[in-house]
Image (spheres, grey):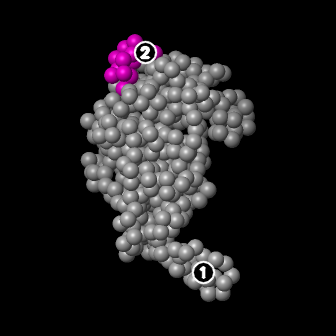
Amino acid sequence: MPVITNVACRWRPPENRRLELSSLFSPFKLRGITFKNRIAVSPMSQYRSREGYANDWHLVHLGRFAMGGAGLVYAEATAVEKDGRRTHGDLGLWDDAHVDALKPVAAFIDREGAVPGIQIGHAGRKASERRPWHGETPVDLEDVSERNEAPWQAIAPSSIPYADGWPLPAEMSEEDIQRVIRSFGQAARRAGDAGFRILEVYAAHGFLVHQFLSPISNRREDRWGGSPENRRRFAIEVARSIRANWPEEFPLAFRLSATDWLDGGIEVEETVETAKALKSLGVDMIDCSSGGIGGKERPRRMVIEEGFQTPFAEEVRKTAGIATMAVGFLWGGKACEDIVSCGKADMIALARELLDDPNWPLHVAEELGLDEGHQMWPMESGWWLMKRDRLLKKLGLRQAPDNRT
């Protein structure tokens, strides 16, 4: 795929003093990287890859969020090993050959003023799964006949299936564990080569790193299981491996499930200790999510409402002394402004809200009275929208908001 070299559209900060009144739209620095605002595009799996390679879909899907004003754009969960994919459609960084296909994606995001990020992970016992619209169940012979997609053997800390009806994963040997740890480090190196400037480890939602962390899925009796210290050992070694291969000036984040929402599972107090341990190894931010370890059914303790996971980000930030990202059922601009301004989290992340409206950050800036005349939009669209509003107002054909020119 050719690298796009046109730089005419690169974002430049508008001369807008109103931005100084907002916490959500204030710059944020981690290590040597500065985000123009606190709005992140959460990793969203698209299942459009073949053999792990990015394509035009990923360029357009992620590029529109950079054009829409987000400060950080994460590429989706990307497998560090071929057998660590969740589905046949997952992105991959298990081979040096994957790098060139991702370079145009990272370069475009960067040129539009957002920081390009990528999430890396291993599915563990959730590997060899159908895409959600094919049933979100284990791959079987039907997939072979209909899509030429065969199942493969999943691995896990313990030989415990993800849910009823799922195959038993193979319990990982010491050799397996060390190989996967090295694979995270090599994937991090490739991510840097591709042009990404922040890396997030997928250690939540029932994927492999979370499987080691949670006593629900980790029943090992060796140094990788049992006590909280042993269960977090895998995450710690993954962080070490990545930091040995990831530039010092680039930030490293972990997405953690702060609670399993299940009796006998992880609670936020244990997550705080995990965050402290990761911070000591060079992890810079915790993306605070929850759940995902106990099968497909939502746990009874899990009550979903707007911003329901934000208290986890606040607790980890306050108690572990590390930057956090709030994520999950966030959609209100003023509510997100309050999360940052009140010190509940350093950044907020949205996913499906941005699928519905990729220009959400620009619309929120207008809602908060920070943008006048579409100054914050790319010139190629903002100029025309400004002209439209002026004409409509002049002709009285359509009422423009009071804070528009």
Residue 312 visible in the picture: yes
Whether 229 is among the magenta residues is: yes
- Whether residues under marks 2 and 1 lie with C-beta atoms below 8 angstroms apart, the answer is no
Taking the spot 49% from the left edge, 40% from the top edge, the residue there is 309
Give residue 87's quadrant in the image: top right
Closest to the observer: 46 or 259? 259
Mark 2 and mark 1 lie on one chain; the one further toward the N terminus is 2
Nearest the viewer among 14 and 146 is 14
Q: Is residue 50 magenta?
A: no
* Extreme residue in the top direction: 221
Q: Nearer the viewer, residue 169 or 373?
A: 373
Q: Position of residue 178 (x, y in %)?
A: 36, 26
Give the Cα separation between the discs numbered 2 and 1.
64 Å
Residue in view at x 39 percent, y 35 percent: 183
Task: Tell me the residue that label 2 is attached to.
Answer: 220
Magenta region, residue range: 218-232
| Image x and y of residue 227, in percent | 36, 17
Mark closer to the observer (2, 1) = 1
Compared with 290, 171 (above or below) is above
Q: Residue at x 49, y 57 (%)?
A: 334
Instruction: Please rate how many residues cluster around mark 2, counting C-alpha atoms within 10 Å: few if below 14, some from 14 to 19, many from 20.
Output: some
Q: Secondary structure at mark 2?
A: loop
User: Residue 150, percent across and down?
Assistant: 64, 32
Most frequent secondary structure within the magenta stretch: loop
Question: Type of residue at label 2?
Answer: Arg
For the point 38% across and 44% down, the residue is 324
| Side of 112 relative to 52 (left or right) | left
Q: Residue beneath label 1, please?
A: 388
Q: Disc 1 on helix, strand or loop?
A: helix
- Please, what is the three-letter code of the amino acid marked with disc 1? Arg
